[in-house]
Image (cartoon, helix red, strand yellow):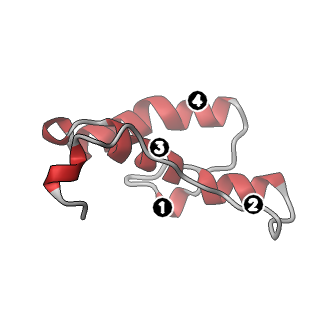
Amino acid sequence: GIDRKYKQLLLGSGCQMWSEWIPRIEDMQRQVFPRIAAYAESGWTIENKKNFTRFSTSLSQILIPRWKQKNIAWHKESTPQAE
């Protein structure tokens, strides 16, 4: 929703995660993954390259297998085409 005249001034974006009320690492991971991937996609992909189908495919073919390999508890319900 930022005015177009200011877009050239943006260098990046930031995403916070406050964990003081999260009892377990697995709970924190479920709150962060895959949201952090979507956040990175929206912040670092240039406008004319954004494509939800490509992102969703990359998520299921690249990121989710990596998260499984590293035993990251990701939130399946917030994932398009969750496995």
Disc 1 element: helix
Mark 1, residue position: 78
Horizontal side, residue 16 vs residue 42: left or right: right
Mark 4, residue position: 66
Labels 4 & 1 near each other (Cβ < 8 A) = no
Cα separation, mark 3 vs mark 1, equals: 11 Å
Residue type, label 2: Asp
The first of marks 4 and 1 along the sequence is 4
Q: x, y percentage for residue 40? A: 43, 42
Question: Could you classify mark 2 by the number of other residues whose Cα lies within 10 Å: few (under 14), some (14-19), or many (20 or more)?
Answer: some
Report the residue that reaches farthest toward the right.
23
Report the number of discs: 4
Residue type, label 4: Arg
Residue, x 71% and y 62% (percent of image)?
18
Cα separation, mark 3 vs mark 4, equals: 12 Å
Residue, x 58% and y 29% (percent of image)?
66
Q: Out of 70 and 39, give the one closest to the viewer.
A: 39
Cα separation, mark 1 vs mark 2, equals: 14 Å
Residue, x 32% and y 38% (percent of image)?
57
Disc 4 element: helix
Residue, x 38% and y 52% (percent of image)?
81
Horizontal side, residue 9 vs residue 30: left or right: left
Mark 2, residue position: 27
Q: x, y percentage for residue 59? A: 42, 39
Q: Nearer the viewer, mark 2 or mark 4?
A: 2
Q: x, y percentage for residue 70? A: 70, 31
Mark 3, residue position: 37
Cα separation, mark 2 vs mark 4, equals: 18 Å
Q: Out of 55 and 69, give the one closest to the viewer.
A: 55
Labels 3 & 4 near each other (Cβ < 8 A) = no
Q: x, y percentage for residue 26? A: 77, 54
